[in-house]
Amino acid sequence: MFKMFLNKLSKKERIGLFISIGFVSLALLDRLIISPINNKIQQINREIKISEKQLGCGLRNLNQKDIIAKEYQKYIQYVKTAASDEEETAKILGEIEELARRSAVYLVDIKPQLPQKIDFYKEYKVEVEAEAEMESMIKFLHQLNTSSQLLRAEKLRLSLKEKNSSIVKASILVTKILIP
């Protein structure tokens, strides 16, 4: 049947038919076999590049493991928390009293407040009323802000104890933030 059809066609028509069958065959071959294989190869190459970058980052981190561990050991003491809020408040009060003793500052009153849970951390606050010479008060504030417990003097109000006195009264709000 196909042979009869071909015999009816002229030589030019047969050549055109074979050329068009060739083009259609190539198009089908491209769409059904070559393009999917090419797309899969490109996808695999992209995944290889991503994996190489991730491996490079992982190797860089692995090479810095000792440095990171040493730095972590420096700061581990700051993230350790006490067993309870009362113990943490007691640690803060003990630190404030020790710093006041070393600075020759007289503590008039200390009022710890209840800790507040804010987002992912707890904030401990202590109101401190103190008296001292200005030089001692400055030394106390400096030691407070550089203490190993990461205490901060958040609010400070200074006034003279008496009109012609060199002793100052201070009202200080001391805070500490802990990540439980």
Image: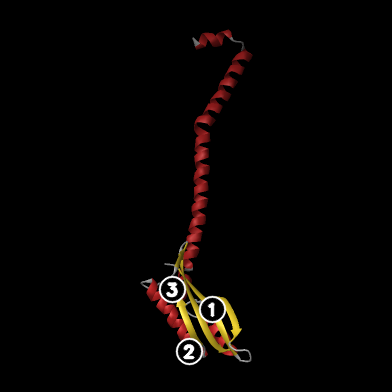
- Give amino acid for label 1: Ile
Q: Which residue is mark 2?
A: 101
Q: Decide which of tag 1 and tag 2 comes sooner along the chain.
A: 2
Crowd class of label 3 (few under 14; some 14 to 19; many from 20; radius 10 Å): few
On residue 76, which mark appears? 3
On residue 172, which mark appears? 1
> CA–CA distance between discs 3 and 2?
27 Å
Residue at (48% x, 58% y) in the render: 55
Residue at (38% x, 74% y) in the render: 86
Q: Decide which of tag 3 and tag 2 comes sooner along the chain.
A: 3
What colour scheme does the image use? Answer: secondary structure
Q: Nearer the viewer, residue 102 or 73?
A: 102
- Give amino acid for label 2: Arg
Contact check, label 3 and label 2, Cβ < 8 Å = no
Is residue 146 visible to the viewer in this orientation of the structure? Answer: no
Locate residue 97, reporting x and y percent: 46, 85
> CA–CA distance between discs 3 and 1?
28 Å
Above or below, 87 relative to 12: below
